[in-house]
Image (cartoon, rainbow, N blue to C red):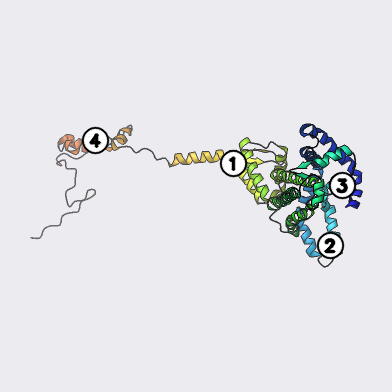
Amino acid sequence: MDTIASLFSFITTPVSWVIVQFHTVYGAIFGPDTGWAWGLSIVSLVILIRICLIPLFVKQIKSTRAMQTLQPEMKKIQERYKNDKQRQSEEMMKLYKETGTNPLSSCLPILAQSPFFFALYHVLNGIATGDKIGVINEQLLESARKAHIFGAPLAAKFTDGSAKVEALGASLTDVRVVTAIMIVLMSASQFFTQRQLMTKNVDTTVKTPFMQQQKMLMYVFPVMFAVFGINFPVGVLVYWLTTNVWTMGQQMYVIRNNPTPGSKAQAAYLDRLYKHVTHNGKTRRRSEKAIVKAIVAKGRDRNDAERKFINALTKVGFAAQADGNVVKSEAQAAAQAEDGASASAAAAKRQQPKRQSKSQRQSATPKAAGEPTSLIKSDEPEDAKPSGGAGAAKQTGAKPGSGGRSKAQSGQRKGGPQRPKSPSKK
């Protein structure tokens, strides 16, 4: 470890200077010899480092997604050249060059953070041994050795003996309890961070060896942190626990607002985006427009969640544009208006006219000019009509003397020539 620390000694002085500056601020609030002053100085150092590493983190996300997109092509190359490892490597490098991806980009934040980690470890180890490191003088060294976090000195380790712990002004039980809890929290945060990446932000439609490797790392990393954590000073455990919590929160934000296509997180995000767009009538944020633009550009290559999102917008009369905006669809609005008009016409057609009584129909029938009176039915009962005479003949058109009978006698036809009676046989 001394050899490794010497390799990163060029950054030890800047790290110690940053810690001292934060200690000056927090020491004025909590007291210069308290664990809060030194502990918060380490936490602030972590936050400062992680803020500086945000561009590398963004590059890591893009590289990881690019690698996930290339998994089907990589699998084809592996199957095609499974007996020729050299040709397989050449084709892989050619694929990386054509797509502009780099497999090592996913490790950039860890690699960039390693010098700060070893420099901090070297500073805290110097505090434990009583050596002045960087800008930490004797006064600051004595103050740091007196600082305790929940009863455990910053420079104490889980594997330290009772004599060394007592020299730092603490008990072995306090040191081991505090370090054990911090190691468990550090491993648990690492496991949860990797787990949410595998369960929520991985394209479930593609099954590749890359996913199996990530699943294996979900269990390997926590074990590694637990094994190496027993040899870390309390100050270093504070550093790693803080950076793991930062990574977990940062990843949760990215998964929620910029999920991987085809993942469960994307389906949840598009569901929220659909509700937001239908409520406000448009996309507001730049990130929302970027995601809608990418979905529109895919065309028929959209996954199930993206197709469901586009179809849901269409049903409520919205259309996603190529520039990422969502506007009211005129064609959809016209179709809805046409459907409404057709429904109204159909309803009117189905409506039956009001049924009228016999007297209303007769009174509503106009008497045509020159129409014979006999063609119009009379409401007068038949008993009131004259049964004989000229008046009756005149009205009915029958000859006088016919007796005015309007009905044919029984046995006779009502119209046309009558059948002659056959003579009776005598």
Q: Tell me the CA gap for discs 3 and 1.
A: 70 Å
Labelled disc at residue 88: 2
Task: Determine the secondary structure under disc 1.
Answer: loop
For the point 79% across and 62% down, which residue is it? 78
Q: First in sequence: mark 3 or mark 1? A: 3
Q: Amino acid at mark 2?
A: Gln
Q: Amino acid at mark 1?
A: Val
Residue under numbered circle 4: 379
Res 292 visible: yes
In the depicted view, which residue is nearer to us: 321 or 93? 93
Q: First in sequence: mark 4 or mark 1? A: 1
- Callout in the foreground (1, 2): 2
- Labelled pair 4, 3 in contact (Cβ < 8 Å): no
Q: Tell me the CA gap for discs 4 and 1.
A: 61 Å
Q: Residue furthest bottom?
A: 83
- Callout in the foreground (3, 1): 3
Q: First in sequence: mark 2 or mark 3? A: 2
Residue under numbered circle 1: 316
On screen, residue 385 versus residue 172, left or right, reads left
On screen, residue 271 versus residue 121, left or right, reads left
Q: Residues within 10 Å of mark 3 (few under 14, many from 20)?
A: few
Q: First in sequence: mark 1 or mark 2? A: 2
- Callout in the foreground (4, 1): 1
For the point 49% across and 39% down, which residue is it? 344
Image quadrant in which you'd find residue 338: top right
Q: First in sequence: mark 4 or mark 3? A: 3
Image quadrant in which you'd find residue 330: top right
Task: Determine the secondary structure under disc 2.
Answer: helix
In the depicted view, which residue is nearer to us: 129 or 1? 129
- Callout in the foreground (4, 3): 3
Q: Tell me the CA gap for discs 1 and 2.
A: 50 Å
